[in-house]
Amino acid sequence: MPDRTGPLTERQRQIAAAARTLLDTRGPEALTMRNVAEALGIKAPSLYKHVPDKTALETLVVAQAFTEVAQALETASTRGLPGVAKAYRDYALAHPHVYRLMNYRPLRRDLLPPDLEERTAQPLVTAVGGDPARARALWAFAHGMVSLEIDGRFPSDADLEAAWQSGLAAFGG
């Protein structure tokens, strides 16, 4: 991997795209160095010239996903808290495997581009009036709701829209 402050090489962008496609279409079991190399039409050892290990491969996907989430939340921020919450939920439900990779394990902040996590969080902070503690609580609520929804943990007759509205009301949304 290049210095985390530097741009990706063209080959690293191709690797990230192939990894993302595998994850989105075939799930986390498909995200292997061998499968990514095969998708690119190269041998696995060649992949290691550009991405040193699976952690680095996953970090490419996670960084791309954080950028996508940041863009979605920034766009939605003009609609206030309800818009930000909807954008967060929509992204998670549209990309459940990526969402799990981003959020269901410790985050390797040391491997992410600087300020990417802060950029992603900023629309949440703004949506709750600038209070970082309330933004963390909002994120915990939203993460819990989408995680339970992605994992099929709500009963089939649960009114999730009402649950979201109730939760957001607690944050002033």
Image (tube, rainbow, N blue to C red):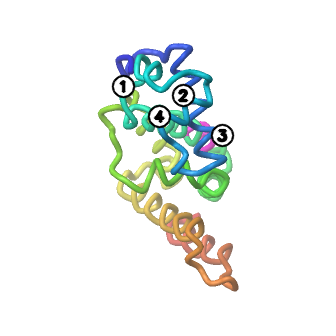
- N-terminal of the pair, mark 3 or mark 2, is 2
- N-terminal of the pair, mark 1 or mark 3, is 1
Q: Could you say which disc has been placed on residue 75 in the image?
A: 3
- The magenta region covers 70-74
Residue 103 locus on image (x, y percent): 44, 53
Identify the residue at horizontal 49%, vertical 17% (top origin): 8
Badge 1: how crowded within 10 Å, few (<14), some, or many (20+)? few
Q: Could you say which disc has been placed on residue 52 in the image?
A: 1
Q: Amino acid at mark 3?
A: Thr
Q: Which quarter of the image is occupied by the C terminus? A: bottom right
Report the Cα–Cα distance between label 4 and label 1: 10 Å
Q: Amino acid at mark 1?
A: Pro
Tell which of 102 and 16 is nearer to you.
16
Q: Could you say which disc has been placed on residue 21 in the image?
A: none
Identify the residue at horizontal 46%, vertical 18% (top origin): 46
Badge 4: how crowded within 10 Å, few (<14), some, or many (20+)? many
Residue annotated with mark 2 = 37
Q: Amino acid at mark 2?
A: Ala
- Badge 4 element: helix
